[in-house]
Image (tube, rainbow, N blue to C red):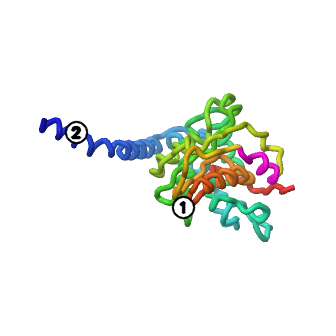
Amino acid sequence: MAYSGGLRAWLRSVVPQVPRVGAVLWRIGDRLFDALPADCLLCRGRATAGGLCAPCHAAVTASTRDGRRRCPTCALPLEGLVGCPDCAAVAPAFDRVIAAFDYTFPGDLLIHYLKDEKRFACARVLSALLARRVRADAVGLPCHTILVPVPSSRASVRRRGFNPAAEVARALARRLGLACRPTLLRRVREGERQASLSRAARIANAQGLYVCGARADGCDITIVDDVMTTGSTAHVIARAFKNAGAASVRVAVLARTRHHLSSS
């Protein structure tokens, strides 16, 4: 009986540590994988596994180091603009956006390779780029942040077989040691394709598209997505989370487009 009681006490002390140990092992594995020699995903030159060579890495992240003025909320480049036209038209429900790079060549190729060619190694390098940007950000993310990927439409999942935002969110969670909870957000209908819509139309189209799967009272939420164009999707999701009690809602995206869309 004493042995049985001792075994139960030992299990009670060990089991809660399993997720933490697993997270540490994942991070160690990512670092070891990143250090292995391999071909660059863009130019096929010498790089590290699932990564980029130094010149390609510099080319992808050049936009984050060019010193251009950006909107402090939505990260839109403000070159030639007095203020942010997107945030002035509709005040975003989210608190801040962190983007790994601007949606231009050659970074856009990495997103294309992941989404359309199913090169899952790109999820690793893209999450690494975003994690590095989060760590370098002046504000960053709260230590208890919960990462929530934007759900794909059923049509996109059928076409691709996976949700790119979820792949990146899981890899990002491992790198930053954060929780990833895809089930906190559900997509309840398909909605019209956004590509040809104005910002105002995108916001209207996204109304009622997403619902929170549970209360988020006091939680710090970070929405994870691949590309931000107008922030309309993030705005609608952030509002849903704040209505569900979230203390803050930030957005972490792989790429931010450089040009705003008309509200009309």
What main secondary structure does the magenta stretch of the protein show?
Answer: helix
- Nearest the viewer among 136 and 36 is 136
- Residue 140: which numbered mark, if any? 1
Quadrant in which residue 13 is drawn: top left
Q: Secondary structure at mark 1?
A: loop
Q: Do we see residue 134 in this rendering?
A: yes
- Nearest the viewer among 10 and 2 is 2
- Nearest the viewer among 146 and 137 is 146
Point out the image quarter for the N terminus. top left
Quadrant in which residue 29 is drawn: top left
Mark 2 or mark 1, earlier in chain: 2
- Nearest the viewer among 12 and 46 is 12
| Amino acid on which disc 2 is placed | Arg
Q: Residue 216: x, y in percent?
A: 54, 52
**Residue in view at x 62 percent, y 39 percent:** 164
**Residue in view at x 22 percent, y 43 percent:** 9
Q: Residue 237: x, y in percent?
A: 66, 50
| Amino acid on which disc 1 is placed | Gly
**Residue in view at x 74 percent, y 48 percent:** 207
Q: Secondary structure at mark 2?
A: helix
* Mark 2 crowd level (few <14, some 14–19, many ≥20, 10 Å Cα): few
User: Is label 2 in contact with label 1 (beta carbons under 8 Å)?
Assistant: no
For this orientation, the residue located farthest to the bottom is 82
Q: Which of labels 2 and 1 is toward the front? A: 2
- Residue 148: which numbered mark, if any? none
Q: Residue 244: x, y in percent?
A: 59, 53
Q: For marks 2 and 1, give the CA distance.
A: 41 Å
Q: Is residue 58 above or below residue 162?
A: below
Residues in magenta, as a range: 199-208
For this orientation, the residue located farthest to the left is 2
**Left or right: where 252 falls relative to 37:** right
Q: Do we see residue 125 in this rendering?
A: no
